[in-house]
Image: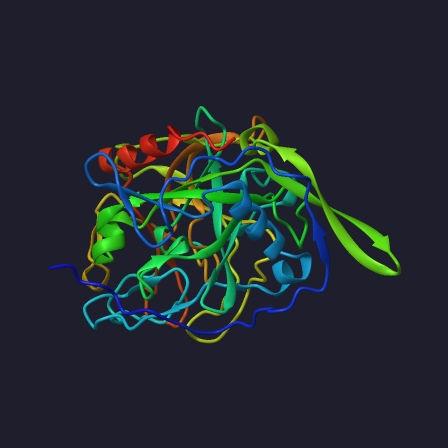
Amino acid sequence: MYRRLSLGLVGGLAATSVVAMVSFPAPAAPASAVTTASLPTMLKGDVSSYALAATQVDMRKVASYWSPDRLKRASSYEPKTKPSPSTTATTSAAEVGRAAASTPAASSPAASAPASDAPPMVGKVFFKVDDKEYWCSASAVHSGYKNLVATAGHCAYSLARDKPVENWIFIPSYANGDTSAGIFVGHTLYMHQDFQGQGDFDRDYAFVTVYRGFTWQPYTDAGKVKYRSADAGLLEDRVGAFHFAWNKGTGRRVQVFGYPAGAHPDGSRPYTGQDVKACANTTEKKMASAPTWQLEHGVRLTGCQFTSGASGGPWVIGYDSAKRTGWINGVTSLTWNLNGDGRVDAVSTPYFNTVTQRVYLQATRQSTS
């Protein structure tokens, strides 16, 4: 029997009105439909997929939904959670847990990533759940079709609603509202069936194929500001991409990137979510577990104080700031308050193994142009 987590949404105001007129050129021939948004397609083994915007018509509707004002008013994703007393982990979208006083403290605080050093393929995903708009972190990952994004499973699939989120887009190189690197509409979501079916956070990762990107070009018509779209090309051509890595073991030096924004459990709020932040440390050798989340093989990084908004951000091995690339080996999934002081002091990712590779490889086979 499948066990589902009961998650409700809290916090954040979202815009519901569009104040700008948007226009698109006539669409190309529609892409072939993959499936309906309400039903998964079961692929090889334990991989499932969901259509997010199966046709060019669907893509245009999603793109038109995200006016510049809506993007500005979206909130970091914060599912309400209630961890059991046996675990100190919470989702990276809602830091509310605390640990026993005997738990060792984390090592060093999170460090900022200077704008000039921030990987251009790191960005935000925006999406809608019910009548509110939210965002998480994500990054471009290499594929032959140059159209793939990696993020957390809970940033693409709503366990509470038992269906994919709506109006999913990715904006790489996002900083203080800047979308000049392009807006990329999600085509199809690929994930492991145990996350969708059981809420298993050992599988809290997702790979999403995206359409060619566009940018907004403002113009004035009869005294009103309107926007028209301009082609931004393929995602990987635009900003590059991380390579995919799996079965790399623990005890490795990694850099974690993301857009933390929310408050710590004690109410302090050190981040704005408006630019990329980074943590760097060596992962623990022992796997982390959190029974509430069915996590048994988590990889944990201490000394990282990321809060709401960091979900889905990449864990990168060997990041080269000159070449602007590296190897993605995880995505931020859970946060931890290890010393019980009311401040998040560690993050964890599902272990990227052969199962993760199967999901990734299935996603790389889809063209969206």
The residue sitting at 27% across, 39% down in the picture is 250
The residue sitting at 35% across, 61% down in the picture is 91
Task: Look at the picture and state if 138 lies above or below 353.
Answer: below
Name the outermost residue toward the left.
1
Snapshot quadrant of residue 235: top right
Give x and y (percent) for residue 44: 22, 34
Query: Relative to 177, is 345 on the left or the right?
Result: left
Give x and y (percent) for residue 215: 68, 43
Snapshot quadrant of residue 56: top right
Seen from the viewer's position, the closer of residues 192 and 43 is 43
The colour scheme of the drawn protein is rainbow
Give x and y (percent) for residue 363: 36, 34
- Residue 322 visible in the current orientation: yes
Query: Relative to 21, is 134 on the left or the right?
Result: left
* Quarter in which the N terminus is drawn: bottom left
Name the outermost residue toward the right.
222
Snapshot quadrant of residue 318: top left
- Residue 319 visible in the current orientation: no
Give x and y (percent) for residue 25: 69, 40
Seen from the viewer's position, the closer of residues 176 and 30 is 30
Query: Relative to 95, is 104 on the left or the right?
Result: left
